[in-house]
Image (spheres, rainbow, N blue to C red):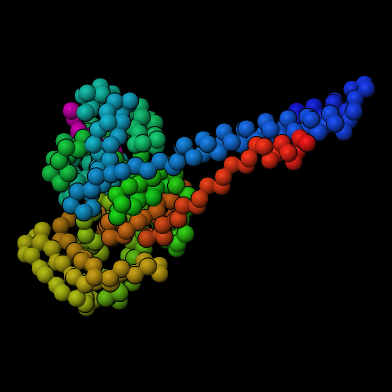
Amino acid sequence: MPTARLLLFRCCRLSRCRPQCRCRLCLGFFLLTLLLALQCAWAAQVSQPKEIIKFRMRDGYLMIVQARVNGAGPFSFLLDTGTTRTVIDPELALQLQAPVIGSDTLAIFSSLRRVRLVHLDDVQVGNAKASDLGVMVDKINEVKFLAPGIRGVLGEDFLSRFDILIDYKKRWLSFGDSAPDGERSPVRMKGQYRGLPTSNRLLIKAEFMDTSGGELELQLDTGARRAELFPVSHESLSSQPWGGVMAVSGGSKGITIHSRITMRIGTTIITDLDVIQSHRGVAYDAAGLLPASIFHRVYISHSGGFVVLNPVERKAKPMPAPPDASSVMRNGGS
């Protein structure tokens, strides 16, 4: 823009110049150039829509996406907000020749085991790309039984770098989306287990309306099928009268299922919910699991520390037609 002002100024200072005519000519030329640039930008905006990533859903709740790892692939990965660190299977680690950088403890269901840590240069889903990840290596047979064909699990160490909108009904997600309209429910991304800090969490407060036990912190989990309460949370709820229907399975690892339960998160009310009270020992920093799939759409703002549950879908605004070049020349360059 300073160049345009300079051209107009110099035009009027030339000897034997007719300032009014020359300035109109330069102004018309400038407006035409600006118009062409705007038309190119408008065309680019139309030809480059926001990326929508389709996912495959299994059993009505598991999300399977295609990811590239160190430039190779794509490979099928389970997308799981309940997993703090990404996991790949040994065959993929060998194929990528990923260097070992240490070890860590992997918790799957009620089992704990020590596994290798390897370094990945980058992991990419669509245009969302994260670099320098230390990921676990495990056969993940328990997870592959639920989602055959996957090569790993994408955890919050990858997902937490983006704000994410998930549409379960249409089976797509997008990274980097702006926050939609709706109530913003706070989430904690750091917890504590046995006095030690935990990270890469999505802990949200929920209240079961059928009891008087107060609010509990649940992990928002795309890998959970039903709402579940762990034994540590039973002290405040087990003695309370539950509404609905109850079913019990025996044994030390048995469960109690409460049906037709109502839960509240902020002002959002979820009805006819099945809640599992588990008797299995679980190493966890939350009172239980909140399945993300009970909502039609979920927006997770890792940057803002909140979620929007069942946000209203935005209606696409029609793009304005580009201005007509001939009309600009008539107005500015006559």
Position of 199 relative to 135 (above/below): below
Q: Is residue 122 left or right of residue 114?
A: right
- Quarter of the rendering containing residue 234: bottom left
Q: Outermost residue toward the right?
A: 16
Q: Nearer the viewer, residue 230 or 333?
A: 333
- Quarter of the rendering containing residue 35: top right
- Asked whether residue 250 appears in the rendered view, the answer is yes
Q: Position of residue 1 (x, y in %)?
A: 73, 33
Residue drawn at point x = 24 percent, y = 70 percent: 272
Q: Position of residue 245 (x, y in %)?
A: 15, 74
Residue drawn at point x = 85 percent, y = 25 percent: 10
Position of 80 relative to 315 (above/below): above
Residue 32 falls inside the magenta stretch: no
Q: Position of residue 202 (x, y in %)?
A: 36, 53
Q: Is residue 227 left or right of residue 190?
A: left
* Tally of numbered tags: 0
Residue drawn at point x = 68 percent, y = 40 percent: 327
Q: Nearer the viewer, residue 61 or 95?
A: 61
The quadrant of the picture occupied by the C terminus is: top right
Q: Nearer the viewer, residue 331 or 273?
A: 331
Residue drawn at point x = 39 percent, y = 37 percent: 128
Region in magenta: 86-91
Residue 90 falls inside the magenta stretch: yes
Position of 327 relative to 252 (above/below): above
Q: Outermost residue toward the left?
A: 251
Q: Position of residue 191 (x, y in %)?
A: 36, 53
- Quarter of the rendering containing residue 224: bottom left
- Asked whether residue 142 appears in the rendered view, the answer is no
Position of 70 relative to 211 (above/below): above
